[in-house]
Image (tube, grey):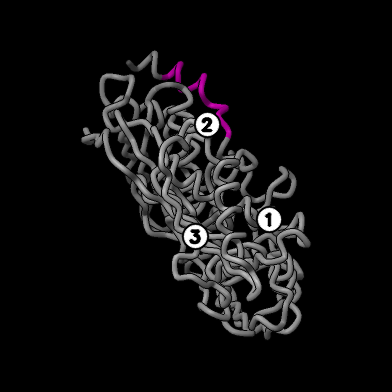
Amino acid sequence: MSKINVDHVFTSESVSEGHPDKVCDQISDAMLDACLKDDPNSRVACETLATTDLVVISGEITTKSFVDWDAVARKVVAEIGYTDRTIGFSADDCKVMICIHKQSPDISQGVTEGQGLFKDQGAGDQGMMFGYASNETAEFMPAPIVFANNMVAEFARLRKSNPKKYCFLRPDSKSQVSVRYEGGRPVGVETIVLSHQHTPDMKRKQLEDLTREVARKVIPASLMKGNVKYYVNPTGRFEFGGPHADTGLTGRKIIVDTYGGVGSHGGGAFSGKDPSKVDRSAAYMCRYVAKNIVAAKLASKCEIQVAYAIGVAQPLSVNIDTYGTGALKNDSILEKVVRQVFDLRPAAIIDSLKLKHPFKNGWSYQKTAAYGHFGRNVFPWEKTDMVKELQAAAKKLA
C-alpha cells in the first residue's frame, strides 16, 4: 500500500502548441493521421526535428496512403501560427527535409496477426505503460496539470480567435501551476508562472493583466482565494521563441503529455506512433481502465501498470495501486476485476478504442499532441462506459 502525502504543494507545467517540441509532436501526429486516412493498417514511427527555418521528418513508415509530407508539415506550422518570416520560422519559408524509410520486417512480423511466433497480434515493443486517474477534478485528472494545460490552451484560443486584440501574443508559451493540498484534496492555488512569447512592442502590464484574467477563467474561484503569486515572463522579455530560439524534437514532453508528474511513467513517448506501438495504445488503455475504476467508485485514485514483450499479445503483468483509497479488501482483487472486464491484448485495445479510425469518431491524433493526451472527453479512452461492468465484477469477486 502506498503512503499518501495528504498535506503538500504539487506543481505541474504545460507548454503551448507553439513550443518547439510540441510543433514536432503535432507534425509527427499529422503524418500519422494522413497515413491512417486511406490505410488504417499503416505502420508509422515518425520523428520530427524543427529549428531555425528547417523541419526534418524522419522515421519508419509503411503505408498505402499517398501523403504529401511537405504539405502536411507546412499546414501544421501555419495552423499553429508561425506565418511571420521575420521571427526565424515560418510555414512558407522553412525548408522541409524528408528522411523516411519502411518499417523493419523483423518488427512487422511480430505485430502482424498470423506472421510471428504467436497467432495473435503481438506488442510492437517491450516495455511498461501506466495509466492514472483521480476524483479530485471533473476530468478525473490531477488538478495542477489540468490548470496548467488550460492556461496555455486559453492563451492560444484568444490569440487565434481575436488576432487584432491579442496581436502582441506569439505562439510559444509555457505555464506552471502550484496547488496546495490538504487531506489529499486540492484547496488552493499558490503560484502561477506564465512565460509567453510576444512582439517587441508589447507592454509588460498587458501580459500581466491578461494572465490574471485567464487564470480566473480556467481555474475554479474556490481555489483562487488568498494571495496567489504570479510570475509573468520572469526574465523580463520573451521575444525570441519557437524553433528559431530552441530546437524542437518529437517526444520530449512526456510528462506534459500525461499527468504532470503525478504517478509513474513508462518512459515511452506517444506522438508519431501508430496504435500497434503499445507505448501509445496501452498507455491510452491504462488511462481508460484507471478512469473507469475511479468513476465506478472502486477507488478515489488509481494507477495501473501493464508490461509487454515484443511480439507477445498477452501482457506479462498487470499491477494496480489505489494509494490506499480502494473500496475492495485489497488491490490484488481489483487486478482480477480488471483482467476479467478488460482485454489488454494489443489488437483488442485497438479495436475497443477504435484507434485505427480516429476521423470516423470525431478526433485525430494531431489533436492529442498539444494540451495533454488525457482529460479531454473528445478522445475514446476518456469514456466512462465500463462502470457497471466493473461494479458487477467487483461484487462477485469481493
First in sequence, mark 1 or 3: give its number.
1
Confirm whether the magenta stretch covers residue 386: yes
The picture places residue 231, in percent across and down from the top left corner, at 45, 57
In primary-sequence order, the first of circles 1 and 2 is 1
Q: Magenta part of the protein: which range?
A: 383-393
Say which mark, if any, is on residue 248: none
Relative placement, left or right, of 131 versus 168 is left
Q: CA distance from mark 1 to mark 2?
A: 33 Å
Q: Residue at x 48, y 34 (%)?
A: 140
> Label 2 vs label 3: CA separation?
28 Å
- Residue 41 appears in the picture as rendered: yes
Q: Secondary structure at mark 3?
A: strand
- What residue is shown at x 61% (from left), y 69% (from top)? 198
Image coords of residue 175 (percent x, y): 49, 56
For the stretch drawn in magenta, what is the main secondary structure? helix
Q: Badge 1 is on which residue?
A: 40
Residue receiving disc 2: 138
Residue 380 or residue 140, whichever sits in front: 140
Closer to the chain start, of discs 2 and 3, is 2
Q: Which amino acid lies under the numbered mark 3 shown in the image of this protein?
A: Val
Q: For the residue marked with disc 1, what is the amino acid?
A: Pro
Secondary structure found at label 1: loop
Q: Is residue 327 above or below residue 260?
A: above
Residue occupying image coordinates x 41% and y 51%: 12
62 falls in the magenta region: no
SS type, badge 2:
loop
